[in-house]
């Protein structure tokens, strides 16, 4: 008994020191999180905060952190689990875990399911992008329903570093390399400056349990490969690697904000027109803009268009080359049906499908408006000796009227079309003719094909068919004028 008493006297101070150290570590964790919250003005007194809760270590830590701080900020806390319908065997247990956790903390808990695979297939995006978009949309809807002021998500400093590296590998510019924003509208990230190791240590010291998402280990996702294979190497080279990359992202973000002021001013002069499917920009102001501001202005203009998705850094540079060196009518083709077309004074970036001509019937010589091509075809009969200038054979075409049989048909190209281009002396497929003439793909269905009795008379604006040309014995001519509508 005396020995036990002496042992307790000896060991008790050491236990107190250990407990005090543990308590100090926890307090330091709280202080570090508060510093981030205050730095980015994440919370206001009386805020209702919805926490995105998955049951993983980061989100569980975030929930406990905000629950601890709710007295300090007079917060109301709610939590929500979003089921992506990707892991049906694991989700019920995760929901039950999150539900019990919230019950123990007296926090309202909500769940919502989203069909990630269906959206990914429909919008032709990868699973991770679809999951992210749907997750934020679901959290936003829940926050509206429960009148939450903020949505807190659990991205940490490791996530920040991984994101910067991912974007670097994909060729991102300064905006992409600024990483995950600590605050974006009502979304806040209180753990963004805290490393994953610190989070796990906090949970261990507080004896807080959590669950692990099996998809976080799958090597098919680039982020997981970076996390499991590349980050350990970076940490072995530089133990402060996470902190350094996160700090770099912060610097890039601050410089990015500065550049955005110049971009906003530039866009006021650049923007001509915009719809959900295209944006039109004035070329002249862009030709003198600093390349940094120009790249960003193009990015912002394109991102402001709902359906222009899939444009990356290299594509922006291609558009810049088109603006600076291209001629009117030049264009480039980008992913997902997007194309950039340079006009005389503007450049249009669009994903609108190319137009196609309707079929028109011409019963007699007359003028007819080809609406889709914004052209007017004017047909006039005249005597051969009235013709003093046969024109260029493109915008003004003369054919032997006796070889033509009304009604004439004006239509778009068809599969298998061929004709005998004037001056060539042999038959040629229309497709090959368009390729040789460098006719842009998205304009080919808008070029009027004029035919008589099933045979092509001419490709309006490009070439007469040799079979209908004026010859020495021609007495009557049919003049075809192609005029743009003003």
Image (spheres, rainbow, N blue to C red):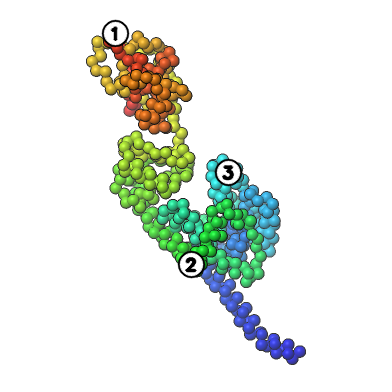
Q: Residues within 10 Å of mark 1 (few under 14, many from 20)?
A: few
Q: Which residue is mark 1?
A: 473
- Location of residue 71 in the rendering, given as x and y in whole percent from the top left corner: 58, 68
In the image, farthest residue toward the right: 1
| Local secondary structure at mark 1 | loop
Can you tell which of label 3 and label 1 is closer to the viewer?
1
> Which of 92 and 430 lies nearest the eye of the viewer?
430
Can you tell which of label 3 and label 2 is closer to the viewer?
2
Q: In the image, what residue occupies the spot 39% across and 50% down?
A: 296
- Location of residue 393 in the rendering, given as x and y in whole percent from the top left corner: 30, 21
User: What label does residue 119 carry, if any?
Assistant: 3
Q: In the image, what residue occupies the spot 66% across and 65% down?
A: 209
User: What label does residue 114 carry, if any?
Assistant: none
| Local secondary structure at mark 2 | helix
Q: Which residue is mark 2?
A: 237
- CA separation in Å, label 3 and label 1: 67 Å
């Amino acid at each position: 008994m005396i020995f036990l008493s002496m042992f307790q006297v000896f060991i008790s101070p050491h236990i107190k020191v250990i407990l005090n150290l543990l308590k100090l570590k926890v307090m330091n964790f709280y202080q570090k999180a508060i510093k981030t919250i205050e730095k980015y003005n994440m919370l206001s007194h009386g805020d209702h905060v919805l926490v995105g809760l998955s049951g993983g270590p980061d989100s569980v830590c975030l929930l406990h952190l905000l629950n601890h701080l709710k007295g300090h900020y007079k917060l109301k806390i709610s939590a929500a689990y979003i089921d992506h319908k990707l892991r049906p065997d694991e989700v019920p247990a995760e929901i039950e875990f999150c539900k019990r956790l919230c019950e123990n903390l007296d926090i309202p808990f909500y769940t919502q399911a989203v069909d990630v695979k269906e959206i990914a297939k429909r919008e032709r995006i990868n699973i991770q992008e679809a999951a992210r978009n749907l997750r934020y949309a679901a959290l936003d809807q829940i926050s509206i329903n429960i009148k939450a002021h903020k949505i807190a998500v659990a991205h940490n400093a490791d996530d920040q570093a991984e994101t910067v590296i991912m974007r670097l590998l994909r060729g991102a510019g300064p905006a992409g390399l600024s990483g995950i924003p600590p605050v974006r509208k009502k979304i806040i990230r209180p753990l963004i400056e805290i490393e994953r190791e610190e989070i796990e240590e906090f949970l261990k010291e507080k004896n807080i349990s959590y669950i692990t998402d099996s998809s976080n280990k799958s090597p098919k996702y680039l982020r997981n490969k970076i996390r499991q294979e590349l980050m350990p190497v970076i940490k072995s080279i530089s133990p402060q690697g996470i902190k350094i990359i996160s700090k770099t992202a912060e610097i890039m973000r601050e410089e990015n904000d500065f550049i955005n002021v110049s971009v906003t001013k530039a866009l006021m002069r650049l923007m001509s027109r915009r719809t959900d499917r295209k944006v039109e920009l004035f070329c002249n102001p862009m030709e003198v803009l600093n390349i940094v501001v120009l790249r960003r202005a193009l990015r912002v203009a394109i991102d402001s268009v709902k359906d222009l998705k899939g444009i990356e850094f290299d594509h922006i540079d291609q558009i810049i080359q088109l603006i600076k060196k291209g001629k009117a009518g030049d264009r480039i083709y980008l992913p997902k049906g997007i194309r950039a077309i340079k006009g005389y004074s503007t450049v249009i970036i669009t994903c609108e499908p190319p137009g196609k001509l309707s079929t028109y019937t011409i019963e007699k010589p007359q003028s007819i408006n080809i609406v889709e091509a914004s052209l007017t075809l004017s047909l006039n009969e005249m005597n051969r000796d009235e013709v003093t200038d046969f024109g260029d054979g493109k915008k003004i075409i003369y054919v032997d009227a006796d070889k033509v049989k009304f009604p004439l048909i004006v239509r778009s190209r068809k599969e298998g079309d061929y004709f005998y281009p004037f001056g060539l002396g042999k038959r040629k497929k229309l497709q090959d003719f368009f390729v040789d003439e460098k006719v842009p793909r998205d304009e080919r269905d808008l070029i009027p094909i004029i035919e008589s009795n099933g045979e092509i008379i001419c490709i309006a604006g490009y070439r007469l068919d040799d079979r209908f040309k004026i010859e020495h014995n021609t007495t009557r001519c049919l003049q075809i004028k192609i005029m743009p509508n003003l």
